[in-house]
Amino acid sequence: MRVHLCVVGRLRAGPERDLIDDYFKRFDRTGRALSLGPVSVHEVEDRKGGGMAAEAVLLRKAIPNGATLCVLDERGRVESSPEFSKRLARWRDDGVQDLAFVIGGADGIDTALRSEADFALSFGQMVWPHMLVRVMLSEQLYRAASILAGSPYHRV
Ligand SMILES: C[S@@+](CC[C@H](N)C(=O)[O-])C[C@H]1O[C@@H](n2cnc3c(N)ncnc32)[C@H](O)[C@@H]1O
């Protein structure tokens, strides 16, 4: 199951990028034997000030046809890491070929695009900066793969 991160904004070189690259490298390595990954990042940017609607047009183009769509949204469902790992495994076992995660920009995700999602995942009711949400998601993907692989990374 290929994993796509469709996100608003370009992340410049720096600590967040290093963390994301590291977690995705680990996710790809751990996920290979589990039919999870590879992961690819699709960054979109609307330079014309078109807001969420314009960003949604660009995001839709970045989401592969037929992909299962999971939006990151503070109003979504909060899950434990083991629950999230089971969800990933279920999508994979159900034959999902492409799984796309969408993280919005400063204004959030367009309502219409949000309503098209198969699932809305929340990292709690607080609103986090989108670049941090990218880091958190990349870590949770690696953690989920580790849980499914039975490796000791997740210890709770
Ligand atoms: C700065 S937030 C935008 C918040 C915006 N005010 C809204 O109402 O949606 C940017 C993006 O980060 C993600 N995000 C922020 N906090 C989150 C949370 N607690 N759980 C999941 N995703 C979150 C969402 O994808 C959101 O669109």
Image (cartoon, grey):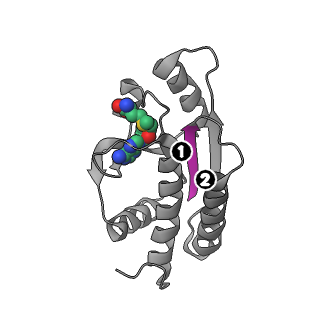
Q: Earlier in the sequence, mark 1 or mark 2?
A: 2
Q: Nearer the viewer, residue 20 or 44?
A: 20
The image shows residue 8, relative to residue 101, as above or below, that is above
Q: Are marks 1 and 2 in contact (CB under 8 Å)?
A: yes
Q: Residues within 10 Å of mark 2 (few under 14, many from 20)?
A: some
Q: Residue at x 50, y 80 (%)?
A: 149
Horizontal and vertical percent position of residue 101: 49, 46
Residue 90: quarter of image: bottom left
Q: Is residue 118 visible?
A: no
Q: Residue at x 42, y 59 (%)?
A: 91
83 is within the stretch colored magenta = no
Q: Which residue is mark 2?
A: 16
Q: Nearer the viewer, residue 45 or 119?
A: 45
Q: Can you tell which mark lies on residue 131?
A: 1
Regarding ligand 1, which quadrant of the image does it lie in? Answer: top left
Instruction: Judge: label 1 CB < 8 Å from ligand 1.
Output: no
Q: Quadrant of the C terminus?
A: bottom left
- Disc 2 marks a residue whose amino acid type is Glu
Q: Magenta stretch: give its range.
A: 1-7
- Disc 1 marks a residue whose amino acid type is Met
Q: Residue at x 67, y 58 (%)?
A: 18
